[in-house]
Image (cartoon, helix red, strand yellow):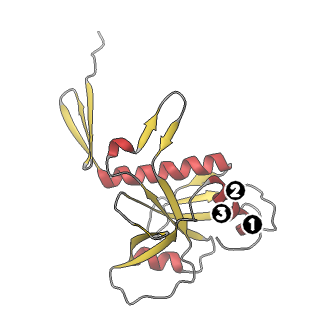
Amino acid sequence: MAKSLNLRFDCSTTGVVYKVDGTEANVDINQQKEQFSITYVRAVASVAGYSLYRPNVDDDSVDLGIAARGETGPILSPRLELQLKCTSRDVLDSGFVRYPLKLKNYNDLRINALVPRILVVVLVPDNLADWLQQSEAELCMRYCGYWVSLRGQPETQNTTTVTVELPHSNQFTVEALRGTIQRISFGGVP
């Protein structure tokens, strides 16, 4: 005889609490933000027609890579690597997203790497239940991702974080990603 499964979950700003047959399992909110940002990039890359790869170890500030087949420039199969961040903090300020990036990540992203790298910061609502809205007509992920290349940025005297400015105009969209991959295909940088 099959046993019925009693599943309940409660969304809060501290994470999701799952109860399966009375046993509680917590999911850390930072892990949820990481997974949400990966899913956001995966959706954009999928619609753009690119594939993703994920390093086994993130010791070089690369969470995901995007790979294209062919392209139109002299560099075939261009790639782009991404450091992902996700926040619900109020980081919007006069045309920019101002994000406090750890110094290690800043230094790893500003180097002249063979595969160009960008920082993508995904903004989400404070309330976890508002991150995703779904109906038969649409699937809506809230809010938006922004990107910036830190390649060639100067060293800093900061010891823990560097506040990075991501222009509002640099939304991480299908069109923006295609344009970036196109530039890389012609030997340019993001």
Q: Which residue does the numbered mark 1 point to in the structure image?
A: 185
User: If the image is split into quadrants, where does the C terminus sit?
Assistant: bottom right
Instruction: Check if mark 3's residue and mark 2's residue have beta carbons within 8 Å.
Output: yes
Mark-to-mark CA distance, 1 and 3: 9 Å
Amino acid type assigned to the residue bearing label 3 in the image: Arg
Q: Which residue does the numbered mark 3 point to in the structure image?
A: 79
Q: Which residue does the numbered mark 2 point to in the structure image?
A: 68
Of 3 and 128, nearer the camera is 128
User: If the image is split into quadrants, where does the N terminus sit?
Assistant: top left
Instruction: Check if mark 1's residue and mark 2's residue have beta carbons within 8 Å.
Output: yes
Task: Using a 10 Å C-alpha cutoff, classify the residue at mark 2 as few (fewer than 14 neighbours), some (14 to 19) or many (20 or more).
Answer: many
Taking the spot 46% from the left edge, 69% from the top edge, the residue there is: 61
Instruction: Check if mark 1's residue and mark 3's residue have beta carbons within 8 Å.
Output: no
- Of all residues, the one furthest to the top in this rendering is 1
Mark-to-mark CA distance, 3 and 2: 6 Å
- Of all residues, the one furthest to the front in this rendering is 94
Task: Using a 10 Å C-alpha cutoff, classify the residue at mark 1 as few (fewer than 14 neighbours), some (14 to 19) or many (20 or more).
Answer: many
Amino acid type assigned to the residue bearing label 2 in the image: Ala
